[in-house]
Amino acid sequence: EIVLTQSPGTLSLSPGERATLSCRASQSVNSASLAWYQQKPGQAPRLLLYGTSNRATGIPDRFTGSGSGTDFTLTISRLEPEDFAVYYCQQYGRPPFTFGPGTKVDIK
Amino acid sequence: QVQLQESGPGLVKPSQTLSLTCTVSGGSLGSGGYCWNWIRQPPGKGLEWIGCMTNSGTTYYHPSLRSRVAISADTSTNQFSLNLNSVTAADTAVYYCARDGLYWGQGTLVTVSS
């Protein structure tokens, strides 16, 4: 089982600031099989990025993904009010398709 | 547009079986190289992948649940199902069905309690 670790657990930032979220895997992950999700309270997760860096339909370009091997990063270039949420990474290359524990981005 | 909708009891007694159904519209269970997933989220906690079934019928399960879980599909009704037996309070969660990561149901809360 590939274990994903996300850091930090909570990121306190102001609108307009840059957010950098980390996802580290216990084993190498195929970069074609790494996704990021955003979840707001009471809602299902929403796919942001798949294949490490490909934005899903309708996702603004302030969201970018990068990384390879065991280290992946989600960057939000300038936080908008609607970006304050919890973010999860997931690997879907090798079952079980595990999620990271999440990073909460909250308003400073 | 693919849409998914979970249905099933919101309350299950300990030691019994949790059974949920996901109804798919706007797409066919039997086509495409997708894995049809069940994912859960305990209150206030993170996402846990339970398992998935491909359109060819191959199933994958989380090792921690493998002895208690079964996912099946009925292509005639375009539904797939989750059965989780011997439930305890630790199985209380919002249960989601999803097609790959793009399409999700709204989720359904299942509480395990006597």
Image (spheres, coloured by chain):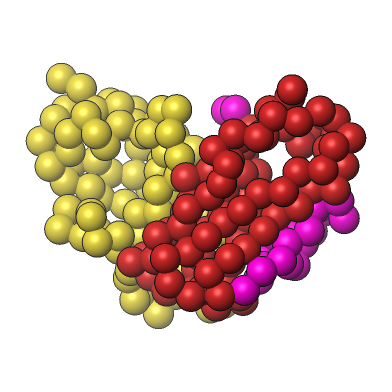
Chain colours: A red, B yellow
Look at the image and give the residue range highlighted in magenta: A41-68
Quadrant of residue A40 within the rendered picture: top right
Image location of residue B32, percent across then percent down: 56, 77
Q: Is residue A27 left or right of residue A40?
A: left
> Residue visible at 51% across and 73% down?
A29
Q: Is residue A32 left or right of residue B21?
A: right
Image location of residue B96, percent across then percent down: 46, 45
Whether A60 is among the magenta residues is yes
- In the picture, the quarter occupied by the N terminus of chain B is bottom right
Q: In the displayed structure, would residue A19 be above or below residue A67?
A: above
- In the picture, the quarter occupied by the C terminus of chain B is top left
Image location of residue A72, percent across then percent down: 62, 63
> Residue visible at 25% across and 50% down?
B83
Quadrant of residue A44 within the rendered picture: top right
> Residue visible at 43% across and 72% down?
A27
> Residue visible at 53% across and 69% down?
A70
- Judging depth in this view, the residue of A23 and B94 nearest the camera is A23
Whether A52 is among the magenta residues is yes
Q: Is residue A45 visible?
A: no
Q: Is residue B50 left or right of residue B96?
A: left
Q: Is residue A106 visible?
A: yes
